[in-house]
Structure formats: C-alpha cells, structure tokens
Amino acid sequence: MKRTTGTKTIKEKPYHKKAIRRRKPNRSIAGDIALYIMLLLVAFIMAFPIIYAVSSALKPLDELFKFPPTIFAQHPTLDNFSDLFVTMGKSWVTFSRYLFNTVFITVAGTAGHLIIASMAAFVLAKYDFPGNQTFFKLVTVAMMFTGYVTQIPNYLILNRLGWIDTYWAIIIPAFASPMGLFLMKQFMEGIPTSLIEAAKIDGASEWMVFHRIVMPNVKPAWMTLIIFSVQALWNNRAATYIYSEEKKTLVYALQQIQSGGIARTGQGAAVLVVVMIVPIAIFIFSESQILETMASSGLKD
C-alpha cells in the first residue's frame, strides 16, 4: 500500500491481523467450569468451621442440644452474647481490664518481635561475619522445639529475672521467637545487594537503608509475621506465668466462663466467636496487602 504526501511516496506495511491477535488460553469451557467448582468446594470447606461457630453462637440453648444438629440457627438470637457480657460484668475484675491486658500484651509483643526479628535478619542476610551461618543454624534448630519443651527452662529464667506475674513474662519471650527471624531472613536474601550498595553510594545511612529500602521490599514477610504473632499472643492464656487476676488475659477469663458447665454452653459458643474475631479480622485486612505487594514488588539482581 502506498500513500502520497506532497512529492514523496511512503510505503506502508500491510495490516497483519496475526500481530495483534490475542493469545487464547489453552483451556476448554468445561475445564473452566470444573476449576470454578473445585475452588468453590475448597472455599466452602475452609469457611465451614467459621460459619458453624457463628451459627452456634446465635442458637438458643434448646437448639444447641438438638439432635441431629443443624448448621444454621432456626431462631437466631443474641442472648448468648448478652449473657456472656452479664457474666463478665459480675466479675470483680472488669471486662475492660481483661481486654486492656490482652491488647497491651499483643501489641507490645508483636511490635518488639517485628523490630528485633527484622534487624537481626537484615544483619544475617546481608553481612558476613564470623559465626554467621552457625548462628542461623541455631535459629533453625530452635524452630524444632515447641513451647511445651522449653516451658520449664523459660519459667526458671523468668523467675530468676523477677518477671513472673508481670506482663514481661509473656512479652519478652515473644521477641525471641525463631519463626520471625527465619521468615524475615529468607525474604531479605532476595533483595539485590546492588540496590543496597547503590543507596549507600548515594549517602544513605544503615538505618535509612533498612527503613526506606529493605523493609518496604519485604512487606509480605512482616505482614505475615504480624498475623502469626497476633494470633499467638491474642490466644495466649498466660496462666503459667501470670497469677494475679487483674493481670489475666481476656482469653483466660472467657475460657473460665466456657468451662462453667452445661448451663453456659451458649456462652461458650459466644466465647469462641469473640476469641477468633481479632485474628480473622487482621488476616482479612492484611491478605489484600500481602497479595498486592507480592504481585508488584518482585526484584531480581
């Protein structure tokens, strides 16, 4: 095809449909339908425990003992929650005090764990020093031991430090959880060293490199760390280390009500919902940020 502009003749390339043809996925409609059905089935299986717990909390007492049990409440009511708060109001320690104890332990423990694990992981991942690999192997081995194995040594150490029956007996051990250090180090090793070196050449300090470059690029790691830490601390009864009633956690108080017998079965169902609200809410709000960061912040050296 030719096109004349003034005295010049310009040749134009023929229009190729294949050049702009979109690539179709190599999958049939039946395969798409089967995939969506499988995803819906998996989603239902994962959501069923939560649905059943909420439904049980809304059932009156006669429906809780009905056989065969029903999934959904036929006559939903909020009496279980109102009875729960009435029972908590009769305690000589107020509900707000239990809530403050749990929130303070969870926030302080999570913040300290995130800061210490991130700083230690940055040093292990990007600096070579004598004993680097040995120290990380010790961290890996520490992940093999559960809290039940280390409970007696922890108690003896905390007792020697004078932290028994204080908030620090729960907060300080949370700082040293090996899971957070391992997770942060594995993510930080994926950050290009050239990026850090370029920032130092531009005059960035160690703190600025850590705060402005490293931490934003490992956002999926520390968001995941927050989820795990909040879940562990929020559900911690702390009965082993804290004896004073005014320092007890909310989960401990709610479980005491839950163990009150058959008459408190409805309140026990409400307790389960109250306890799981915070971890689920944090996971829901954090999940979108984790997926968005993992999809948009991939870096390669």
Image (cartoon, rainbow, N blue to C red):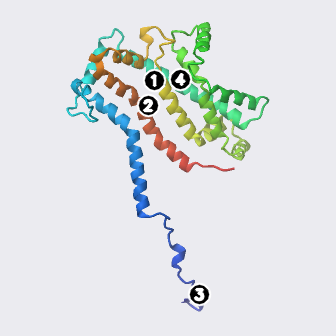
Question: Marks 3 and 2: which is nearer the front?
Answer: 2
**Rendered residue at 39%/52% (across/down):** 37
Q: Which residue in the protein does label 4 denote?
A: 109
Amino acid tagged 1: Asn
Which residue is at 42% across, 49% downward? 39
User: In terms of image quadrants, where is residue 149?
Assistant: top right
Q: Which residue is mark 2?
A: 279
- Mark 2 Cα-neighbour bin, 10 Å: few <14, some 14–19, many ≥20: some
User: Can you identify the residue that label 3 sits on?
Assistant: 11
Q: Is residue 193 above or below residue 264?
A: below
> Which numbered disc, 1 or 4, marks the residue closer to the eye?
1
Nearest to the eye among marks 1 and 3: give it: 1
| Quadrant (top left/top right/bottom left/bottom right) for the N terminus | bottom right
Secondary-structure class at tag 3: strand
Q: Nearer the viewer, mark 2 or mark 4?
A: 2
Return the residue at label 1.
235
Q: Amino acid at mark 4?
A: Gly
Relative to residue 294, is residue 225 depicted above or below? above
In the image, what residue type sits under mark 3? Lys
Q: Amino acid at mark 2?
A: Pro
Mark 1 or mark 3: name the one nearer the start of the chain.
3
